[in-house]
């Protein structure tokens, strides 16, 4: 489903889809001459998917921040991978002595989903845990959609 993209502002999904289409064509189409999948083109065909942390609704992964059409929750499109990275960092440590890793960890602690994962690591299935957590409460996100979008 197409999301409500709030960052960047004025994101043009039609133009973005056209870029995907043009990239596929530039790569020679979705199939090679022998009928095999043209993987370079295939990976240009769409932006991937993400889901609303609060209700699980799936969306195309456009932009940096979205508002869920179903429940109005606002979230960064990298919420799930950053949460998982935070949990893994807590579980396995930052391997002291690796200054690049330590610097990246310090920077990532500024991301609310990474920080939550790091500060609340779990030993259960991460994906199931991520979708079971009360993100609206955790992130103190408003229930009402103040912009009037549905």
Image (cartoon, rainbow, N blue to C red):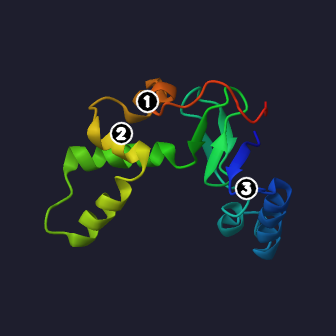
Residue at image point 38% right, 44% down = 84
Which callout, 1 or 3, points at the residue further toward the start of the chain? Answer: 3
Residue in front for this viewpoint, 146 or 25 = 146
Do tag 2 and tag 3 residues touch (Cβ < 8 Å)? no
Q: Quadrant of residue 58?
A: top right
- The residue under label 1 is 138
Residue at image point 20% right, 49% down = 92
Which callout, 1 or 2, points at the residue further toward the start of the chain? Answer: 2
Separation of residues labelled 1 and 2 (CA atoms): 9 Å
Say which element carries label 3.
loop
Q: Which mark is residue 128?
A: none
- The residue under label 2 is 116
Q: Dot 2: few (<14), some (14–19), or many (≥20) neighbours within 10 Å?
A: some
Residue at image point 76% right, 56% down = 11
Q: Which mark is residue 9?
A: 3
Say which element carries label 2.
helix
In this rendering, would 59 be left or right of 75?
right
Which callout, 2 or 3, points at the residue further toward the start of the chain? Answer: 3
The C terminus - image quarter: top right
Q: Dot 1: few (<14), some (14–19), or many (≥20) neighbours within 10 Å?
A: few
Q: Nearer the viewer, mark 2 or mark 3?
A: 3
Do tag 1 and tag 2 residues touch (Cβ < 8 Å)? yes
């Amino acid at each position: 489903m197409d999301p409500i993209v709030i960052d960047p502002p004025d994101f043009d999904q039609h133009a973005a889809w056209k870029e995907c289409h043009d990239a596929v064509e530039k790569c020679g189409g979705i199939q090679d001459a022998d009928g095999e999948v043209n993987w370079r083109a295939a990976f240009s065909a769409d932006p991937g998917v993400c889901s609303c942390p609060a209700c699980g609704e799936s969306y195309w992964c456009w932009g940096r921040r979205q508002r869920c059409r179903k429940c109005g929750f606002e979230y960064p499109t990298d919420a799930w991978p950053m949460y998982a990275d935070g949990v893994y960092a807590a579980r396995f440590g930052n391997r002291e002595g690796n200054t690049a890793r330590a610097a990246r960890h310090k920077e990532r602690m500024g991301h609310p989903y990474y920080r939550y994962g790091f500060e609340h690591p779990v030993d259960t299935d991460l994906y199931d845990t991520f979708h079971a957590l009360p993100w609206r409460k955790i992130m103190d996100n408003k229930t009402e959609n103040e912009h009037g979008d549905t």
